[in-house]
Amino acid sequence: MLEVVKVVKSFYGLRALDSVNLKVEKGSMVGLIGPNGSGKTTLFNVISGVYKPDEGEIYLNGEKIAGLTPHEICGKGLGRSFQQPRLFKEMTVLENIMVSARSQKGESLSKALTRSWLEEEARLAKKAFSILKFLQLERLAFNPASNISAGQARLLEIAKVLMGDPQIALLDEPTGGVAPRLSEKIFDYIRKINREFGVTFLIIEHKLGVLFDYVDYVYLMDRGKIVLEGKPEEVAKSSTALEVYLGG
C-alpha cells in the first residue's frame, strides 16, 4: 500500500533522511522505532506532504505522491496524527471530529451561503458519534477539548484520523504521555480498527514493550537511515537494536 524508495531530505546541509526505503503492506500494522532525532517524524512529514523530499519517490497504492500537498495526499486515503495532539481546544470533542471530514460542502462559499450543507452536517454528526461510541468517548461529546485527559486526547486524535476515512494511517507516538496500562488500551483500539475497518497502520512508538505485542513488522531508524527491519521478535533480539539504543 505504501512504498518509500531511496528518500533523501536535508536541512541546512544535514541529512535528516538518508536514502530511506520502507514498505507497508495492505492490512498490516508496522512499527517505526529509533532513538530521538533518528528521523522518524521527518519521514512522516515527507510521506504526508509537509516536506517535499530532495530525492526519491513515495508511492501510495502504486501512485506517486511525493511532492503533493498534505490535503491532496489526505484525499488519496492517507491520514496521520501528531506527536502532540493538535486539537481545537475551544471546540467540543464532537466538533473536533466533525471538522476532520474530507471535502465538506461548508468549505464552498456558495453552498455555505445557501445552507445546503445542513443535511451533510447532520450526517457528519451521526458519523462522528459512531466513532466516539466505538472509542467509548461518547459521554465526552459536548465537553470542550481543553477539558479532557491526556489519554482521551490521544484517542480523540485517532478519532479525527478515522473521520477522514483513511486507507492507511500514520500515528506518531499514539501513547505519548499516558500510563502503560492505558497505552495497551489505546493499542487495543488501534488493532480493532485495523481488523474491523481494514485500516493499515504505520506507527512511531517509544514504548517498545507495548508496540511489539501488536505490530506485524518493525523498522529501526538511526541517524536518518533504516538500519534494521524484521518481525518484532527478531528486532527485539538483535544486537544492532541494542547498539542503537545504547549509543554503541
Image (cartoon, rainbow, N blue to C red):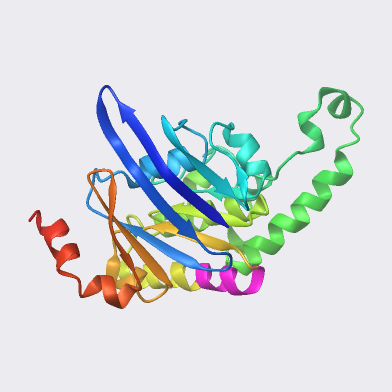
Name the quadrant of the C terminus: bottom left
Q: Is residue 161 above or below residue 212?
A: above
Q: Residue furthest left?
A: 248
Tell me the magenta residue range: 189-197
Q: Quadrant of residue 42?
A: top left
Instruction: Please give the name of the residue rendered at 60% of the width and 74% of the height, measured from the top-left corner.
Output: 195
Q: Is residue 107 magenta?
A: no
Q: Nearer the viewer, residue 175 or 198?
A: 198
- Main SS of the magenta segment? helix
Instruction: Please give the name of the residue rendered at 64% of the width and 73% of the height, measured from the top-left corner.
Output: 196
Name the quadrant of the N terminus: bottom right
Instruction: Please give the name of the residue rendered at 16% of the width and 57% of the height, measured from the top-left corner.
Output: 244
Expressed as whole percent of the image width and height from the top left, the position of residue 200 reads 56, 62
Expressed as whole percent of the image width and height from the top left, the position of residue 123 reads 82, 52
Label total for image: 0
On screen, residue 37 versus residue 102, left or right, reads: left
Question: Can residue 231 be seen here?
Answer: yes
Question: Can residue 99 be seen here?
Answer: no
Expressed as whole percent of the image width and height from the top left, the position of residue 234 reads 28, 75
Q: Is residue 67 above or below residue 12?
A: below
Q: Nearer the viewer, residue 73 or 91?
A: 73
